[in-house]
Structures are given as C-alpha cells and as structure tokens.
Amino acid sequence: MKSKIVALSRNQDFKDLINEKKITNKYVTIFFGKLKNKNFKNLNISFVTKKKIGNAVKRNKIKRRLKNIINLAVKKISVKFEYSYLVIAKPTMLNNDYTNIKETLFQDLKKIK
C-alpha cells in the first residue's frame, strides 16, 4: 500500500503530541498519539533536529536518513496510521551506522500499539 507521508503543520499538533506517549532510544525520541481531524490514509509524521546537533548540512542528513527509514518501515512493518508521530533526533545519529539506526527504529516502531 502506497501511503502519503504528511508533516505536522500546526503548532498545536506539536504541543498535543509532546503531552502524549513516547519511546526513547539512543538515536531518537518518538512521541506518538491520536490527533483530532486526522486523515487515516496519510501518515502524519514530523522530524525535528535541534541546532545543537550541527550545521544545516548535518541536520538535513539526519532528516533524510529518518525519512528513508520511515518509508522502509511503512513497506516492511505495520506502522499504525491512526497515530501521529513526532521524531526528535539526538546527536548520536551522526556518528553511527545507518543499519544500526534502522534496526533500532524498526524495533521501536513495532513496540507502538
């Protein structure tokens, strides 16, 4: 099933998700919860990298990696479309191997019920 990944746009959506459930590992923190007026055919997910991590090139590299991993996760494992997600990257993502990050995120996405 081909799904459209849509970023969160409203400030209130970000505030609501931060008050919901979360899963943390050494690479990212994932906040997830149900939002009102959500289209269940689209996957609502946003990626956040803080300025402390590095310059714009490094932050964009992290976002590209995360988007690629989420696209693979939608195809290979069952990601819950009724939830909206907020993924906040940690500085450890820069220095680690892509496959390690992917496996860790897959495990965390499987835990979400």
Image: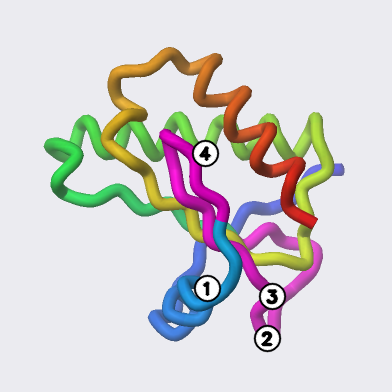
N-terminal of the two: label 4 or label 3? 3
N-terminal of the two: label 4 or label 1? 1
What's the residue type where badge 4 is placed? Lys
In this rendering, position of residue 5 left or right of residue 2:
left
Residue 85 lies, in percent from the top left, at: 58, 60
Residue 97 lies, in percent from the top left, at: 43, 13
**Which residue was labeled with disc 4?**
67
**Which residue was labeled with disc 2?**
36
User: Quick one: SS at disc 3?
Assistant: loop
Whether 54 is drawn above or below 29: the answer is: above
Q: Residues within 10 Å of mark 4 (few under 14, many from 20)?
A: some
Whether 39 is drawn above or below 108: the answer is: below
In this rendering, position of residue 20 left or right of residue 61:
right
**Which residue was labeled with disc 1?**
17
Residue at (78% x, 34% y) in the render = 75
> What is the magenta range?
23-44
Mark 4 vs mark 3, CA separation in Å? 21 Å
Front residue (pair 67, 83): 83
User: Quick one: SS at disc 2?
Assistant: loop
User: Quick one: SS at disc 4?
Assistant: helix
**Which residue was labeled with disc 3?**
34
Any magenta on residue 27? yes
